[in-house]
Amino acid sequence: MTYTNNDLWKIRDTCTRFLHGHGYASPQNYFLEMAEYPLASQRPDQYGEGEHLQAFESEIAALLGHAKGLFFQSGTMAQLIAARIVTDQKQHQYIGYHPLCHLEIHEEKSYQHLHGLQSVLIGDKSRLITKQDLLDIKTLPAFVLLELPQREIGGQLPVWDELVWQVQFLQEKGVHVHLDGARLWECAPFYQKSYAEIASLFDSAYVSFYKGIGAIAGAALVGKEDFICQAKIWNRRHGGNLITAFPLYLAAKKNMEKRLHNFQAYYAKTQDIAEAVATIENIEIRPSIPQVNMFHVWIKADRKRLIENAVRIAQEKGIWGLAHVATTVDPAVQKLELYIGDGAMEIATSDIKDLLSQWISGSC
Amino acid sequence: MTYTNNDLWKIRDTCTRFLHGHGYASPQNYFLEMAEYPLASQRPDQYGEGEHLQAFESEIAALLGHAKGLFFQSGTMAQLIAARIVTDQKQHQYIGYHPLCHLEIHEEKSYQHLHGLQSVLIGDKSRLITKQDLLDIKTLPAFVLLELPQREIGGQLPVWDELVWQVQFLQEKGVHVHLDGARLWECAPFYQKSYAEIASLFDSAYVSFYKGIGAIAGAALVGKEDFICQAKIWNRRHGGNLITAFPLYLAAKKNMEKRLHNFQAYYAKTQDIAEAVATIENIEIRPSIPQVNMFHVWIKADRKRLIENAVRIAQEKGIWGLAHVATTVDPAVQKLELYIGDGAMEIATSDIKDLLSQWISGSC
């Protein structure tokens, strides 16, 4: 049987435990939770102007060690705008990043069609950017984006000294180095640094409020005062300056309060799960020791069979684990992206191990 | 005394009756109302994909007599994208509209900076576009936007036959004619036509869900199947394709159900108010007979004095009427944009007349 997304969601809705992220709450849950949030009784912003929104933006900027912050509807907007401001200023159309950067693979090449920019792909898509990759760059970009952690390769991170070297090497050449912090909150346990120490290495940074934080949607861009003032103008040009943004920024603030202190625990649980899952036959995990609370599970199995098993077991056990399953270059190997959040925290590691074994064997 | 927006909002928050729009609800009100909306317990969209969102998009398309619809975070995105698709297709960079079009005056010239387009301003900013204005166009644009009603001149509308002539004249020349329906819901009482009859004259149309409808934010673009498929790609490029859009589209759907049938009543109340207000000394209304549930009140008064009076009277009587007050070319004349919605429906017309008289005289 082949399942549509809608089929899968219907089965997911019948489950009670969720392997990925923070599980699935209905809009009603969100509305009820938000109604009780104290700031919900306060006046919201108008076109991005409002004391509580500005306080939140300042709070994020301070947390990341930057001068000023701006809330965005999406990271796509925030990062394209960052790239555009810098390239306009430097009158230079090249931007550089990892071959699996969000701008390259998930945004319909907006950087090119909407902003008239060209990309320089740095390094190889199967691994992190290295010193040598930077030394090998032929066309030096005006703007380089480094993603921490590199999501598409299982959430990998360079070691601290390597990161510092890379940022400084580029900055010394006059490059604006931007942090794609879509999952920055996940990096602190590995680096054992504050978010300010990590993000302030960079000239600007973007962070997200839904993925790890578990709000609805939304992002922030931080940087120098003048940079953010320009970003505000571009936000309006992108159509992102809505008459009010409260449904997103109030949820962002509330969920930052709820989850920002959880990442150490997610990280510890991730190590447990990785160790247990790695012992299953026909499974390999990448990276072999997860650096953040996510990793890839490479499963040697027929894709159709694996999904059928996973669906049947979900129906029997009520644990949902199917999300982000992709076939690798080897059609006999499937890749599952596993992101550990509130969902997995509520499932015993041994149950998670059993679940994945059963996906392969087909029997409970 | 000079008031900041924040000062004015603080005073507004102490009022109980509101002359403009639908009054002011807190985020908490919205969350509580939405929690009770039946669709809030259903699975939301993921990146714009979801049965309830698609049903809503189809409903809007059908209401407007078009083949397909797409929900947007903002009208800015929807209309820029419409212009871009058409100009790309026709390999032609000119777009035409009234000099006070939203694209020209409220979007930081995004059409130019983000989309590389040029504008052709049609007609004079103080009045509606005429037949002669169309005959006088020197550079024929690929895309012409007509706004119904023309907001910045007090919500004026061309008579039906004139509108039909203009649209057909342009279409016969191969121009894609787009409806800026930011306040389209407001037009039906004047034309005595269905929304489908009005909107299907055009090649594409945008409508808004907050202004008259009173939801949070959000818009829809409707048009041919292929046009909307392209719009979806551009929505992602603009950063408008969020992981979920439920806080906006559920509120849009709910408020469409709540208010779409109210516009005849708002229109009737508007006629009453206009007639009463027009008799006040030093006040002139424009247009002299409102064509929709909005109009401009031109008040011969010193701006500072007028605002001080309005604030003091708001504090005494609890009626808030200060919004969109602009100084005209004559510094002794102030222009108030009045939009009649649920707020004014709850205030006796005589009280509204008294309020505006007292703004001028300064005494209750």
Image: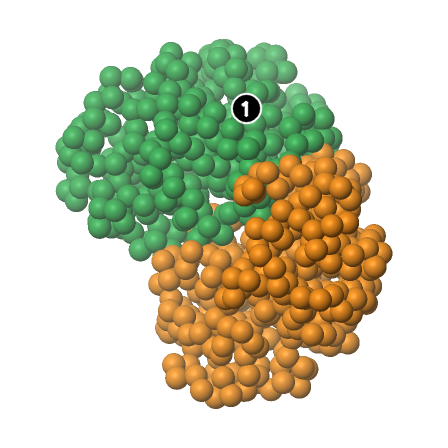
Chain colours: A green, B orange
In the rendered image, which quarter is residue A66 located in?
Answer: top left
Determine whether, in the image, residue A125 is placed left or right of residue B282: left
Q: Is residue A244 left or right of residue A241?
A: right
User: Which amino acid, by three-letter code, is at mark 1?
Assistant: Met
Report which quarter residue A349 is drawn in.
top right
Image spot of residue A337 (x, y percent): 48, 29
Question: Mark 1 — residue?
Answer: A256
Q: Can residue B212 be seen in this view?
A: no
Classify residue A229 by image quadrant. top left
Q: Which residue is drawn at 66% across and 32% down?
A: A42
Helix, strand or loop at mark 1: helix
Residue found at x 47% / y 67%: B83
Q: Give how far across and how far down residue A77 sits, in percent.
A: 44, 45
Q: Is residue A251 above or below residue B261?
A: above
Residue at position x 45%, y 36% from top? A70
- Quadrant in the picture for the N terminus of chain B: top right
Where does the image place residue B292, in percent across and percent down from the top left? 71, 69
- How many residues crowd around disc 1 within 10 Å: few (fewer than 14), some, or many (20 or more)? many
Q: Is residue A75 something that shows in the picture? A: yes
